[in-house]
Each structure stands twice: as structure tokens, then as C-alpha cells.
Image: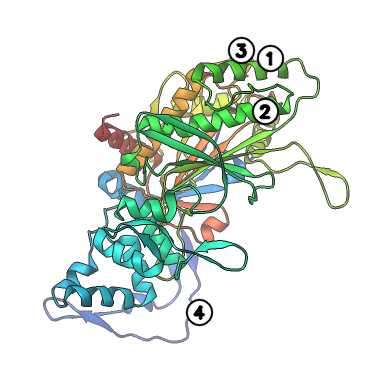
């Protein structure tokens, strides 16, 4: 079994110390000048054209770490990069983009009206780049007014979009949809434009609002995506037009609790209905935390009385951040506004040939890992995983930070996995147990565990944002409702880094890392300390 987890109490790590010979088959030599030194000496490319075979006696060490979960491949750590990061932890950060305003530059040479005309007549690739990177709200408004038609009030403020019938119904008049979306997803666009363009319910379609959460300044809608890429539809908990949250530093812990509350409420209500539990006739108000806990316990009590328990699974995810390149590539989520999505996966589905198949759930692969590990090692996978995490030592054997744990309480642990599939991956693992064993899904998570999960997600995003992360995908690996296999509920947060968007290595599940996980865990702890959480 390919995993770094070991019953012996320490992670398995392979160390490559390369030494090899290379036969030289080159036929031609093309020595040329590369430039000049300050003293006038020329720089030539002699090193590129060696004579004879090449002998590499001692290349830099490469560490190979199989992921804890075999289906997630293997991580390779370049010791040259990692040593540099350990000496200079500031390398593990994304520098803030320099503030830019094309309008201000043009204003130095053109009249205000000429500036407007110049901005809207720029090549599309440049307008896309401005829309994504500009910090100038006036500039963004000019571009917004150029790519769609607004309805304005007497003072010139936008109050809606102009609609036209395209033959299939009335739709907003948008001349350049990519430019429209990119402008609307820029945090510096005035809020009134954000609301009119993308945030007001109905402006992005007719998805029904089937739940909401309001407490203090927090206000969140729960949309139903009926015709979804997920066969049975999915739900989206979106911050509302009067609770605009584009960046992590604008997200409060109460906002996080609201987003997650809608997920828990939908999961419990849907499962209750599947089990034949009647919900209150009056559902105009959301469940309180106490009512939600009562419903959860009722679901589990019914489950314990059934012989054939529905083996459903939950699906939860969060794409945080939006970006669009001038060459026309969308680099992350469909919209910037902070939101979370979730759905439910059944236990069986008929195939085209008439037999029965099990629909895919990512948590099922964790279940397979737990089963195989137990068969091969005679011990519990997650118990050994926690032992390995708590007893971790540095990969390079040198002095310095050796803990992978960023934050923990009695219920959950936020940590850096030994083998990261994103250079900055963080994971959240439920370490709490209930009467029947480990907590493997949200149905088994008490209110205290749920609070800790919400806090862990909030802290993880805060730590990553403090290092400069702008695009983060978060996913849940959960146990199916009917299983009893000692599987623990796990979340993975996967930032996208400007220099590491994924290439052929990642397509083969070979993940290249430029730092030691222990040093990144220390960077996250310092980031949280700076945020004073």
C-alpha cells in the first residue's frame, strides 16, 4: 500500500541522493556570447556544450513522500528550494499586486472625455487585465458602463440592468460577458454596481432561494441549483447584496457560522425527509442551533433502529477567489463573492445495461484507504495518522520547527499534511469521538464539533490569506451515512499559487514542493498570530 502513514509512529519519507552518468550524443557545438561582465569580459555558453560523457556525483537531495491517501499521489520536495525557504520564511508568501490605474496614467496626457474613449477602445486583452487588476473604482465604472446597459436613476446611479428578449426569454443586455464578470468580481468596483450586476437575487438567473440566515451584519441566501452538473442538483449559500464579502479580511466568524449553518440545516432536513421524519409545517424561520442539534440526534436514533440504512453521502466545497487572464483563461471560481456549495450523493444508480452502480463520492476513496490499511497493517489508519502527526520530526533532520499542527482544540486539528498536493495545502481533521466512535460526517458531529469545524475553516482561510493566497479550493471528505468504519471527517484546503498552477507533473499526481511542511506550518502559525485570532 502506497502511503506515508506508518504503524511504527513516524512518517515514511524516501530520500533520493542522485548520482549517475549520462552518455553525450551531441553532434554540434555552438559557442556564443551571452553578454558582458562589468569589467568588460564576455560571458559565453561553454557550460552548455561539455566534451565527453557527464558524470553527476552528488546532485541535490530530493525527498519523496507518498500521500497519506494513495489516491492523492506523491509529493516531491526539492531540498535546494526548501533550504532557501527555511532560511528565509518570507519566501512563503505572495506579494500584494502593485496598485494600478490606467485611467490615472492616461489623465496625465488626455482630457477626461478622451480618457473614457481610450479606456473602452483598448484591445480586449488589456481591458480584461485592467478589469481584473485595477484598484481604481472610477476606471472600473467606465469599463462596466461600456460592456452592458444599465438603468439609471435621475442622479445617474445604476438601479438595474436593461433587459431584452432574445427569443428564449428576457435577458440582460451584455456586450462582453467575460469583461462583465471580471469587472463585477473586482473588490474595488463600487458596491452599488456589484449589486446591480451580480448580487441582487434574480440577476444571475431564476434559482430559487430556499433558505436564508440573518444575524447582525450577516445575511446569507441559500440558492437551489436545480439543473446542476451534480445529477440531483446542489445548493449554494451565498453572501447577500447587503453582506458583501469578496475577501477573507471582510469575512467574520459569524459569516462563516452562517454559511455552514445552512449546510448543516439542509443536510439534516434532507436526511430527515429521506427517513420519513416530518418537518415542522411552519418553516419560515431557520432552525436554531438547539433545534438543529435535536434534529440531528433524532436522525441518528432512527438510523440505529433501521436494518437498511440509506447509504447517502454529503458533498461540500468552496471555491474562494476569482481571476481572469488577459489571454482569456478563467483562473478560478465563477464568482468572487464568498459562497459555499453542497449536495447529496445517493447509494446506488442504474447503469445503461440495467445493473446497479455506486455513484462516486470522494469520501469513498478515504473509506477504501482505511479498509486497505487495516488489512495490511492490522491497525487503525486514522489512529496511526494522528500518532504520526503528533510525533512528527523535520524531514531534513536539522534544528527548527518540527510541528505540523497550526491550531487545534478538543475537537478538530488544523495542520499541514506531510505530503502536500498544493504547495500550501492545509487540512482539518476531526479528532473528537462520539459514543459510537470517531466523527466521520456532519451527522455524527455534535454542536461543539460543528463550532470547532467552523472555527478551523475560518482560521485556515485567515492563515492562508495572511500569506497572500487569493484563490483557494476547499473540499470535504466525509464518511457515508450508513458506514461504521472508523473513518474521520477531513477537509482539504488547496491554494493556487501564481508559480504553481499545475502542469504535467500534477496531471500524473506528482506534486512538486519548494519547502518543508514543518516550515510552512510555522509560517501559518505566525500568520494566525498576526491576525490575532
Q: In this view, does 143 lie above or below 32?
A: above
The quarter of the image holding the N terminus is top right
- Rounded to the nearest whole Å, what is the CA distance between mark 2 and mark 3? 21 Å
Element type at marker 1? helix
Res. 392 visible in picture: no
Among the two numbered marks 2 and 1 on one chain, the one whose residue lies closer to the N terminus: 2
Label 2 SS: helix
Q: Left of 412 or right of it: where is 35?
A: left
- Residue occupying the point 76% across, 15% down: 305
Foreground pick, 408 / 235: 235
> How packed is label 2: few (under 14 Cα within 10 Å), some, or many (20 or more)?
some
Neighbor class of circle 4 (other Cα within 10 Å; few <14, some 14-19, many 20+) is few
**Residue extending farthest top:** 435
- What's the mark number on residue 25? 4
Q: Which residue lies furthest to the front in this view?
A: 154
Mark earlier in primary sequence (1, 4): 4
Amino acid at each position: 500500500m502506497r502511503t506515508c502513514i506508518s504503524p511504527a509512529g513516524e512518517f515514511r519519507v524516501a530520500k533520493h541522493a542522485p548520482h549517475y552518468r549520462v552518455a553525450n550524443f551531441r553532434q554540434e557545438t555552438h559557442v556564443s556570447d551571452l553578454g558582458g561582465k562589468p569589467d568588460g569580459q564576455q560571458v559565453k555558453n561553454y557550460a552548455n556544450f561539455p566534451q565527453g560523457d557527464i558524470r553527476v556525483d552528488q546532485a541535490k537531495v530530493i525527498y519523496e513522500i507518498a500521500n497519506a491517501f494513495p489516491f492523492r499521489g506523491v509529493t516531491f520536495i526539492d531540498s535546494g528550494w526548501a533550504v532557501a525557504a527555511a532560511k528565509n520564511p518570507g519566501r512563503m508568501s505572495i506579494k500584494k499586486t502593485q496598485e494600478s490605474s490606467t485611467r490615472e496614467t492616461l489623465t496625465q496626457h488626455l482630457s477626461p472625455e478622451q480618457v473614457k474613449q481610450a479606456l473602452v477602445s483598448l484591445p480586449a486583452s488589456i481591458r480584461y487585465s485592467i478589469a481584473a487588476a485595477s484598484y481604481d473604482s472610477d476606471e472600473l465604472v467606465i469599463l462596466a458602463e461600456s460592456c452592458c446597459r444599465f438603468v439609471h436613476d435621475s442622479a445617474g446611479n445604476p438601479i438595474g440592468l436593461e433587459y431584452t428578449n432574445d427569443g428564449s426569454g428576457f435577458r440582460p443586455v451584455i456586450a462582453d460577458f467575460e469583461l462583465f464578470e471580471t469587472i463585477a468580481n473586482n473588490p474595488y468596483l463600487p458596491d452599488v454596481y456589484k449589486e446591480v450586476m451580480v448580487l441582487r437575487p434574480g440577476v444571475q438567473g431564476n434559482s430559487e432561494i430556499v433558505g436564508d440566515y440573518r444575524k447582525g451584519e450577516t445575511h446569507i441566501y441559500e440558492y437551489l441549483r436545480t439543473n446542476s452538473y451534480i445529477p440531483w442538483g446542489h445548493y449554494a449559500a451565498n453572501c447577500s447584496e447587503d453582506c458583501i464579502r469578496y475577501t477573507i479580511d471582510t469575512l467574520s466568524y459569524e459569516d462563516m457560522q452562517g454559511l455552514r449553518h445552512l449546510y448543516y440545516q439542509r443536510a439534516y432536513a434532507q436526511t430527515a425527509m429521506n427517513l420519513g421524519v416530518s418537518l415542522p409545517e411552519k418553516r419560515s424561520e431557520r432552525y436554531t442551533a438547539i433545534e438543529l442539534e435535536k434534529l440531528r440526534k433524532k436522525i441518528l436514533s432512527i438510523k440505529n433502529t433501521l436494518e437498511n440504512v440509506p447509504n447517502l453521502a454529503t458533498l461540500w466545497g468552496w471555491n474562494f477567489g476569482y481571476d481572469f487572464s488577459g489571454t482569456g483563461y478563467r483562473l478560478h471560481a465563477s464568482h468572487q463573492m464568498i459562497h459555499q456549495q453542497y449536495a447529496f450523493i445517493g447509494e446506488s444508480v442504474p447503469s445503461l445495461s440495467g445493473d446497479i452502480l455506486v455513484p462516486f463520492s470522494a469520501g469513498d476513496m478515504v473509506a477504501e484507504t482505511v479498509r486497505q490499511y487495516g488489512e495490511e497493517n492490522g491497525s487503525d489508519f486514522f489512529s496511526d495518522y494522528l500518532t504520526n502527526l503528533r510525533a512528527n520530526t523535520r524531514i531534513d533532520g536539522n534544528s527548527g520547527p518540527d510541528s505540523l499542527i497550526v491550531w487545534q482544540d478538543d475537537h478538530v486539528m488544523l495542520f499541514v499534511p506531510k505530503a502536500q498536493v498544493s504547495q500550501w495545502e492545509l487540512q482539518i481533521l476531526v479528532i473528537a469521538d462520539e459514543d459510537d466512535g470517531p466523527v466521520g460526517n456532519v451527522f455524527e458531529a455534535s454542536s461543539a464539533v460543528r463550532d470547532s469545524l467552523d472555527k478551523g475553516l475560518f482560521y485556515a482561510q485567515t492563515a492562508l490569506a495572511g500569506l497572500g493566497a487569493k484563490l483557494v479550493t476547499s473540499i470535504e471528505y466525509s464518511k457515508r451515512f450508513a458506514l461504521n468504519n472508523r473513518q474521520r471527517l477531513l477537509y482539504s484546503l488547496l491554494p493556487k499559487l501564481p508559480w504553481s498552477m499545475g502542469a504535467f507533473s500534477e496531471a500524473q499526481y506528482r506534486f512538486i514542493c519548494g519547502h518543508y511542511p514543518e516550515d510552512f506550518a510555522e509560517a501559518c502559525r505566525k500568520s494566525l498570530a498576526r491576525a490575532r485570532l
